[in-house]
Amino acid sequence: MKIEVQKKRGLRTTLTIVVDKKTIQQKIDERLSELQKEVAIRGFRPGKVPPSVIKSQFGKSIYGEVIDKVLRETSNKAISEKKLKIAGQPKIDLKQFGEGKDLNYELQIDCLPNIELKPLNKFKANEYKIKIEKKIIENKLKEISEQNKQFEDKKDNEKSIIGDQVTFDYSATIDGSKFDGSEGKKVQIELGKDLFLKGFDEQLVGVKKGEIKIVNAILPANHPKKELANKKTIFECKILSLKKSKKSIIDDNFAKMMGAKDLSDLKSLVEKQISSQYSQALSSITKKEILDQIEKNYVLDLPINLIEQEIDLMTRNLKPEDREKYKEKNEKIAKSRIKLGLILNEIGEKNNLKISNEEIQAEIQKQIKGMPGQEKMILDYYKKNPSATQSLKGSLYEEKIINLIKTKIKINSKEIETKEAEKIIADFNKPNIENNQNLKPKSSERQKTKPKKISKK
């Protein structure tokens, strides 16, 4: 095998590789010998089929199989001999091939840049410890209490008011005709929340248990069945029960109902939960401060193929016109990500950082604890999606590198209250909104992720 560097431009190297025809023929003969033991052809005893017969029937496929193997072996050997650190999959361009001929091909390789790591002790960043005020904890407890209302039956002669829980059966029609989903049994709604259909709740104000109530409503524009969207619908509702909310007392009993030991324990859990939400956003700001400084302190040539792959991942779901419109911006983001990835990886390798299977499993268990009752779903997800496990490993690796960097730079630790935290997060978000990096922990988002019972982590 002959290997020559045909050209080198930046990080891209093109090698010319020639494998002589004698070596190719030897590989073909070896494969024919192997197949002689495996192939069964009528008229010949097992293992006694002449190589010439096998070649006459399977020659083209055998040659293709051998060439594929030779290309893999020789390209790997060429990369190893030239001591090239490759970035992504090399490209092969066949120049000459065929039985009785030398194999001649070009191997185009994008290489990783050599990175000389710089000292980290000149970098600095702010790290925040959040202090949650008592008033915020009290407000959160009231919010939890409101979300977990307890109801008791109203008297038979009492009418429904806003805030009551109404249970009913319904039968609906559109233009006098039934439709798919026009029947409902034991539907339960809390009047005033408007979670069923717009304007539905207010028409059930003033009803009594056992009453038949006609309600007019319009089906939503995003109805799963397009033919039913925005249709005027008449609901005949039979009121099964009315319940009024009981006054919530936030005490030890309420705390136990929420999964805590007592009220003090519930307050502690709520404080940790709110603190965690702010800490995640503030940690991201600290991380970005660090990464921005690292990126500015390095000038690197970047592998073209890695940039192209990153842009493809970023824009895969965009319309062609949007890809073109944001081409320059996406290229800039892609280059930044590739550059930082290479530098962080170099720091990780130089410090012999690795992620063990135990660390991956520990993180999966952490996720399971945060989603009670969904253990099987999470385990199945990672079992059936190796790419998800690989992505998790990558995140843990990056986190470990960032934590190492924090031990080597100047960290200015600050204890702040939520009001200051909100301002810091808001100021950070202003220039990052276009890049979808908004980190503000909105109360609505916290509600969506909060389980009904407070879980201990």
Image: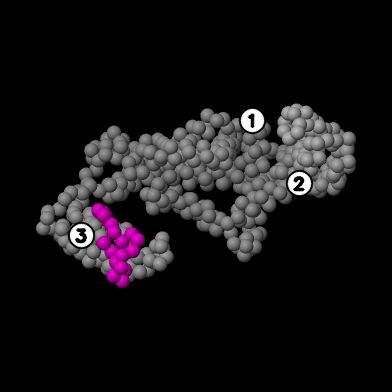
Asked if the stretch drawn in magenta spans residue 178, the answer is yes
Q: Residue furthest front?
A: 43
Disc nearer the start of the sequence (1/3): 3
Q: Which residue is mark 2?
A: 91
Secondary element under disc 1, as helix, strand or loop, is: loop
Span colored in magenta = 171-190
Residue appearing at x 56%, y 37% in the figure: 393
Give the quarter of the image for residue 163: bottom left
At label 2, the amino acid type is: Lys
Label 2 to label 3: alpha-carbon separation: 71 Å
Q: Are marks 1 and 3 in contact (CB under 8 Å)?
A: no
Q: Which residue type does callout 1 highlight?
A: Asn
Instruction: Say whether residue 211 is visible.
Output: yes
At 64% across and 43% down in the image, what residue appears?
Answer: 341
Question: Is 166 placed above or below 286 here?
Answer: below
Number of residues whose C-alpha sits closer than 10 Å to that of mark 2, classed few (under 14), some (14–19) or many (20 or more): few
Query: Position of 34 compared to 309: left or right?
Result: right
Asked if the residue under mark 3 is in contact with the one under mark 2, i.e. CB atoms within 8 Å, the reply is no
Q: Nearer the viewer, mark 2 or mark 1?
A: 2
Left or right relative to 62: residue 254: left
Mark 1 sits on what residue?
Answer: 352
